[in-house]
Image (cartoon, rainbow, N blue to C red):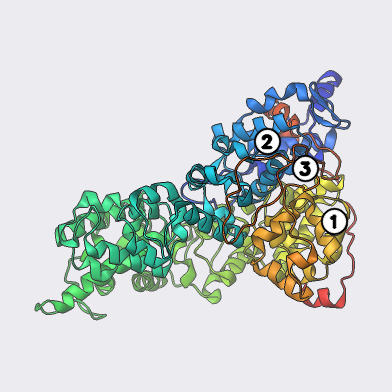
């Protein structure tokens, strides 16, 4: 019950399960990635709140089966039965304390539960697996994890099995490891023994899976038509790949046949690939089939099953095809000039229910046939249609005539898709008093930088506050567009409860300000290991002095976090600083040596990784090695390394007890009232060098 105090016996029981500061990683409690892509923001988790409270109010963590040195070897069965929530909270600091058998059980459990980890978790987990010599067990490991493995350790006899397993993963996780991503593709093609450019057979394509998404356009056209199944798994296609797709579809070599013979079922089987079909290709499709498919796509959009980007791409191409067909027609053009009388008939609520609405009413007819009363009562229903920009401008102008003094707040929540069209002067006329209004306007990812700042300021001017729930709802990317004053206005307690927000897309100036806010919020969380876990998402704004301090603490920074550091701050680090900062992850520099942050650092030193002695294999060469009867599987971009060791050294920081989260998750939900209210520590700013100050 809120405000009540637990009896001593209960308090003792609770504190016996206290995980310690290092175990409460905010990002561990975020929603997993889904097939629809990463979410705009994390969900505030009850587990996170509880974990933070336990961290603050408990001391001297002890629990049955656990010791100060980490998870007791006798309790390795916990890892074999851990639930998904716990496994998503994986962190390398406590996991480095596990024995080989425990780590193996943990990785296998992740595979069986299909746990989706983030790139920063997978990169260091791959290095731990290498240190323990577990890479050869790859058939039992998560496909995403295989993407991060050292390819020089894969035996030639295993290359097809390894490629097939890795090709089931999400290669977007390698966004910050460009060299690893390229090496994976080259090694896979070398394993298949295909020529360059590759002409992939159906069996090759079946094995390569999502790796085809990185293929050149010429390979798509030259390969077996089954390549369509591979391309359906790609999160996006480059313009060249889109052109290759249209060339392949035009050829008639696919199961759909020539465009004139396409049917509704075949188009729907293409999935989101259909959104890439060009206008010239739509003109070859039978009109009735095209209309049926257009209606099904609009229905999917209105039901929220298609992203705004995909549906707009499709609608633009389809309407362009319709316009070209009209121009080629001998019939006179009607209703195409602004101000023409309504020809199609007045728009009603029933008209807006038609999925083919946009085919009956172009933007000029929308202007002529949409009355103020219908628009006022049905603005939400109208904007559920994927209106072209020109039509959106028509709707905006009509709303301005209906509401000359500014759009009412209840209507603002319905026009999120139009926000990007409004000027700062127009936004200043709005009345924003509700957090729900702010979330509706900003959660759609339509508002631009100045508009985001203006909307938030209108809310703050009405005595609104930026809460953790608001931060989570609008997502980390919106922090990038808040003004320095608005960032400073976020209370440290709210920033803590918001969890780990993704601010990697922010400009450097905002990253710097967000780091200062994170340091203010988490500066008193205890040992350096705990502090690092909380501020890790915001280290892109850390100055050189902060990075040097973390290097001295042996935090073993993952390569994903490292590549997001301020390049100017990184250039002031010595080679030894970088080596100690990355710790057991230093070998990952080879996988990301072409990343702009790392390449600029190397240019500042005028040396290569080899010359600096930073080309170390993640599997420590000083550890005991295993011998293999087969030669390693290599590619032009990889080099064989030493055999992986069996014993994993600690990272150098105090041991943290990941296993205690098992007990924390099981505690009663009534304890969620007990929030974290730790006092803030002093701000320990350090002056930067002149070079850093200019960049920071």
Would residue 666 be visible to someone looking at this image? no
- Quadrant of image for the C terminus: bottom right
Q: Secondary structure at mark 2?
A: helix
Q: Secondary structure at mark 1?
A: helix
Work out how far the residue at label 3 is from the one at label 1, CA to CA, in angstroms.
14 Å
Tell me which label, 3 or 1, sits earlier in the chain: 3
Tell me which label, 2 or 1, sits earlier in the chain: 2
Tell me which label, 2 or 3, sits earlier in the chain: 2
Residue 616 in the image: x percent, y percent? 75, 55
Q: Residues within 10 Å of mark 1 (few under 14, many from 20)?
A: many
Tell me if residue 239 comes above or below residue 517 in the rendering. below
Residue occupied by mark 2: 47
Nearest the eye: 117 or 591? 591
Judged from this view, the residue extending furthest toward the front is 629
Tell me if residue 648 comes above or below residue 391 in the rendering. above
Q: Residue at x 32, y 68 (%)?
A: 316
Q: Secondary structure at mark 3?
A: helix
Residue occupied by mark 3: 93
Work out how far the residue at label 2 is from the one at label 3, CA to CA, in angstroms.
20 Å
Judged from this view, the residue extending furthest toward the left is 330
């Amino acid at each position: 019950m809120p405000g009540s105090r637990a009896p001593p016996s209960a308090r003792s029981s609770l504190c016996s399960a206290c995980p310690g500061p290092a175990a409460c990683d905010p990002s561990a409690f975020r929603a997993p990635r889904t097939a629809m892509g990463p979410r705009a923001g994390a969900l505030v988790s009850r587990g996170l709140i509880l974990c933070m409270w336990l961290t603050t109010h408990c001391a001297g963590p002890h629990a049955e089966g656990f010791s100060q040195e980490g998870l007791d070897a006798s309790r390795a069965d916990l890892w074999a039965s851990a639930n998904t929530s716990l496994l998503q909270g994986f962190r390398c600091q406590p996991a480095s304390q596990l024995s080989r058998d425990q780590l193996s059980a943990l990785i296998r459990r992740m595979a069986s539960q299909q746990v989706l980890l983030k790139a920063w978790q997978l990169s260091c987990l791959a290095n731990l697996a290498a240190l323990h010599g577990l890479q050869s067990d790859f058939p039992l490991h998560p496909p995403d994890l295989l993407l991060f493995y050292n390819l020089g350790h894969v035996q030639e006899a295993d290359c097809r099995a390894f490629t097939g397993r890795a090709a089931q993963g999400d290669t977007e996780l390698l966004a910050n490891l460009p060299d690893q991503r390229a090496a994976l593709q080259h090694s896979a093609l070398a394993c298949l023994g295909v020529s360059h450019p590759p002409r992939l057979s159906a069996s090759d394509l079946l094995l390569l899976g999502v790796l085809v998404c990185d293929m050149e356009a010429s390979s798509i056209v030259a390969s077996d038509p089954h390549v369509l199944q591979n391309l359906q798994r790609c999160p996006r296609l480059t313009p060249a790949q889109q052109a290759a797709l249209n060339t392949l579809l035009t050829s008639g070599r696919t199961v759909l046949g020539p465009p004139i013979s396409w049917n509704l079922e075949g188009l729907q089987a293409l999935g989101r690939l259909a959104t890439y079909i060009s206008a010239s290709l739509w003109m070859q499709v039978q009109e009735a089939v095209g209309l049926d498919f257009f209606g099904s796509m609009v229905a999917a959009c209105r039901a929220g099953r298609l992203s705004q980007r995909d549906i707009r791409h499709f609608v633009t191409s389809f309407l362009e095809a319709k316009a070209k067909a009209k121009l080629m027609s001998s019939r006179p053009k009607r209703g195409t000039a602004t101000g023409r009388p309504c020809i199609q008939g007045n728009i009603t609520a029933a008209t807006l229910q038609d999925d083919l609405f946009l085919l009956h009413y172009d933007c000029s007819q929308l202007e002529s046939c949409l009355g103020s009363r219908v628009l006022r009562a049905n603005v939400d229903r109208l904007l559920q249609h994927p209106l072209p920009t020109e039509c959106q401008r028509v709707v905006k102008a009509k709303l301005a005539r209906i509401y000359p003094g500014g759009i009412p707040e209840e209507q603002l929540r319905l026009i999120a898709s139009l926000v990007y069209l409004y000027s700062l002067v127009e936004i200043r006329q709005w009345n924003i008093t509700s957090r729900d209004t702010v979330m509706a306007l900003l959660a759609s990812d339509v508002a631009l930088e100045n508009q985001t700042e203006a909307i938030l300021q209108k809310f703050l001017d009405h005595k609104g506050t930026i809460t953790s729930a608001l931060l989570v709802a609008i997502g980390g990317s919106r922090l990038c567009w808040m003004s320095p004053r608005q960032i400073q206005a976020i209370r440290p307690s709210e920033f803590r409860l918001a969890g780990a927000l993704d601010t990697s897309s922010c400009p450097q100036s905002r990253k710097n300000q967000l780091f200062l806010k994170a340091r203010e919020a988490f500066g008193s969380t205890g040992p350096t290991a705990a502090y690092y876990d909380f501020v890790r998402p915001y280290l892109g704004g850390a100055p050189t002095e902060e990075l040097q301090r973390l290097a001295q603490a042996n935090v073993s920074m993952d390569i994903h976090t490292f590549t997001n550091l301020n390049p100017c701050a990184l250039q002031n680090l010595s080679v030894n600083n970088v080596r100690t900062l990355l710790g057991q992850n230093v070998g990952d520099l080879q996988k990301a040596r072409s990343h702009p942050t790392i390449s600029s650092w190397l240019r500042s030193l005028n040396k290569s990784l080899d010359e600096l002695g930073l080309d170390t294999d993640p599997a420590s060469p000083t550890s005991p090695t295993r011998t293999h009867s087969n030669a390693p599987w290599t590619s032009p971009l990889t080099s064989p390394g030493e055999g992986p060791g069996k014993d994993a050294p600690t990272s150098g920081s105090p041991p943290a007890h990941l296993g205690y989260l098992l007990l924390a998750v099981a505690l009663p939900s009534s304890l969620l009232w007990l929030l974290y209210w730790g006092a803030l520590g002093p701000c320990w700013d350090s002056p930067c060098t002149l070079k850093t100050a200019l960049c920071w």
